[in-house]
Amino acid sequence: MSERILVVGGGIAGLWTALALARKGRELTLLERDPPPPEASADEAFESWERKGVGHLRHSHAFLARLHILIRDNYPDLMEELLAAGCRELKFADGLPLSLQESYRPVPSDKDMTILTSRRTTLEFIMRRYAARQQGIRFETGTLVRGILTDRDAAGQLRVTGVRAEQNGETKDWLADIVIDAAGKNSQMIEWLNDAGACISEETERAGILYFTRHYRLHDPENEPARTKIPGAGDLGFIKYGLFPADNGCFSITLAVPEIEMELRRAIVRPENFDAICAQLPGIAQWTSSETSRPVSRVFGMGELISRWRHMTKDGEPRVLNFFPIGDSVIRTNPLYGRGCSFAGVAAEALVETLERSNDPHERARFYHAQLAKELRQHYDDMVKQDLAAAKRARNALDPDYKPGVKARLFKSFAEDAIMPAIRGDVELMRAFMRSFHMVDAPNTWLRDPRNVSKVLRTWARGKKRNADLYPPKLGPGRTEMLSSLGISPTADQERLKSA
Ligand SMILES: Cc1cc2nc3c(=O)[nH]c(=O)nc-3n(C[C@H](O)[C@H](O)[C@H](O)COP(=O)(O)OP(=O)(O)OC[C@H]3O[C@@H](n4cnc5c(N)ncnc54)[C@H](O)[C@@H]3O)c2cc1C
C-alpha cells in the first residue's frame, strides 16, 4: 500500500511539496484553511482571493533564479502558464547598470540568473490551478488543522500519526504515515509537538525592519518608464526601496524602514506619505507619478519580521518521526532578500529525495534535516549577519555622538569603495556576485576566487577620485530632508532614544 501523506497548508511551500511528490507518482492530501482562488483571472485573484492564512499575500514577491531554474527544469509547462498569465522574466542583462550594458557579452550560464516576478497572487493562483490538475494531489480547502496526533514507538520515540482538523464546523481526525507541515510562519504544529514532549529548539533574530507595499497600475502597460542610471532598488539607510515590475500592467513598490525609525514607520502607512516618499526617490518617482500610473491598493504594512531556524534534530538524531516541516514553519528569513520561496522550493526537492532513498523513519528525518542544513544554512547565516549589521547602522545613524572606530571605517570603506565600485565596473564580477545572491552559488563564493579579490583590491587602491564613475548616483534625499518633507521631526527618535 502506498504511504498516506498529508500536507498541511497550500501556500508556496505546500504547493512545491505537492508538485514534487506528485512528480514522483506519489499521492497526497493537502489540507488548507482558506478557500480556493477565484476561477477567473489574475486581476480577480488579486482583488478578491480571501487568504486569511497568508498575511503577506499582497506584499511584493519575486522568485530568485534558484527557483526559476527549478520551475524551468522540472515544470516547463507550468512555466509556460506563468508566462502566459503575465508573469515576467527579468534576465541578468536586464539588471545590469546602464554603464555595463555596452560591454556585456552573454555567456551560457546567464540563463541561470533569471528572476520571475509578478503579483504573488498571480504566481500562487497559477501554481495552485496547475497543482489541482496533477494526478495524485487532492485539495481539502476550508480545513483548519487544530491539533496533531502522536504516539511513541517501542523505543519511546515520538511519532506523528495524523492531524485533527475542522471542516464545515465538524472536527475530524486525519490519519497519515507522513505529515508535512507547510502551514507557514504562524504554524503551531511545532508548539503542539513540544507540548507532547518533542523538545524542538529554535534560534531567532529580528530582521530589524518593517515592510510597506503599495500596488499601482500603469496607464499604458506597453509603455513602462525607461531605465535610468538610478537603480529601481536601493538603500538610503533610513529607507530601503524596491520596484517590483509585475503582471498585466501592474507593479508594486516596497519601502522597508528600520524598526528604530518609530516616527517614519507610523507615517508611511498613509498613502499620501508613501507616495510623497516615492516621488523623492529618483529610481522610482517616474513610475509612481500620476502621469504614468495610478495606485490600486492601500499601503500594506508588515512587522514582527524575524529570522528563525528550528532544530528538528539533536546531535543528528530526530526529535520526532514521520513529520517534515517545510517553508516558513521551519526556516523563516527576512523578506528583504526574497529567498523564502526559493528556500521552500529547495526543501521540497530535498524532501522528495528523502522519501525516495529510504523507508526508515529515523534515516529519513536525519537525511532531510541534513540536506536543509547543507543547502540553506550558509545563506541563512549570511542574511542574519547582514541584518545585524544593518540594525547597528540604523542605530548609529540616530546617535549624533556616534564616531565609528578604525575597524568600522575600514569595513565601510571596503564595502563602499572597493566591493561595490568593483562590481559596478566589471560584468564578470557582477555575474559572480549575483550567482550567490540568487542562491545558485553559496554566499560569497565569488570572493574566494583570487582573481576576483585582486580586482576588488585594485579598485580600492585606485581611490575614490579615479573610481568616481563607478559609484551609484544619489538615490534620494538624506534623512533630515525626507523626514522634514513629511512633517516629521528628524530629531524626535533621537530624543526618544536618548531618554530611553
Ligand atoms: C512581506 C513579505 C515579503 C516577501 N517577499 C518574498 C519574495 O519576494 N520572494 C520570496 O521568495 N519570498 C518572499 N517572502 C517569503 C515568502 O513569502 C515565504 O517564505 C513563503 O510564503 C513561505 O511559504 P509557506 O508555504 O511556508 O507559507 P505561506 O505561503 O504563508 O503558506 C502557509 C499556508 O498554510 C495555510 N495554513 C496556515 N495554518 C493552517 C492550518 N492550521 N490549517 C490549514 N492550513 C493552514 C495558510 O492558509 C497558507 O495557505 C516574503 C515574506 C514576507 C512576509
Image (cartoon, rainbow, N blue to C red):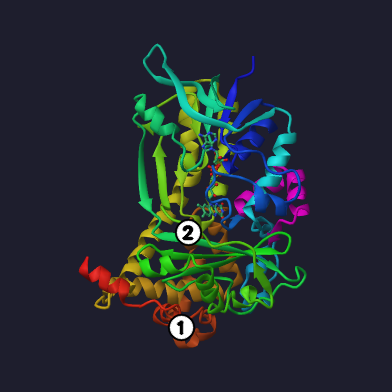
Mark 1 C-beta closer than 8 Å to ligand 1: no
The residue positioned 61% from the left and 31% from the top of the image is 30
Q: Nearer the viewer, residue 308 or 95?
A: 308
Q: Which residue is mark 2?
A: 444
| Quarter of the figure with the N terminus | top right
Residue pushed farthest left?
499
User: Around disc 2, counting alpha carbons within 10 Å, would you say few (fewer than 14), some (14 to 19), or many (20 or more)?
Assistant: some
Secondary structure mainly formed by the magenta segment: helix
Residue 38 appears at what percent x and percent y? 71, 44
Q: Quadrant of residue 431?
A: bottom right
Relative to 34, say whether 248 is above or below.
below
Q: Using residue 7 as the reference point, say whether residue 85 is left or right of it.
A: right
Ligand 1 lies in quarter: top right
Three-letter residue code for mark 1 = Arg
Residue furthest bottom in the image? 465
Q: Secondary structure at mark 2?
A: loop
Q: Is residue 413 left or right of residue 252?
A: left
Q: Which residues are magenta?
A: 64-90
Depth check: give the residue in front, 433 or 478. Answer: 478
- Percent across and percent down for residue 288 are 62, 73
Q: Earlier in the sequence, mark 1 or mark 2?
A: 2
Hey, what amino acid is under mark 2? Asn
In front: label 1 or label 2: 2
Residue 260 placement (x, y as % from top left)? 35, 65
Look at 43% across and 53% down and name the residue there: 305
Q: Residue furthest top?
A: 154
Q: Is residue 190 left or right of residue 475?
A: left
Q: What secondary structure is marked by label 1?
A: helix
Find residue 462 and name its label. 1
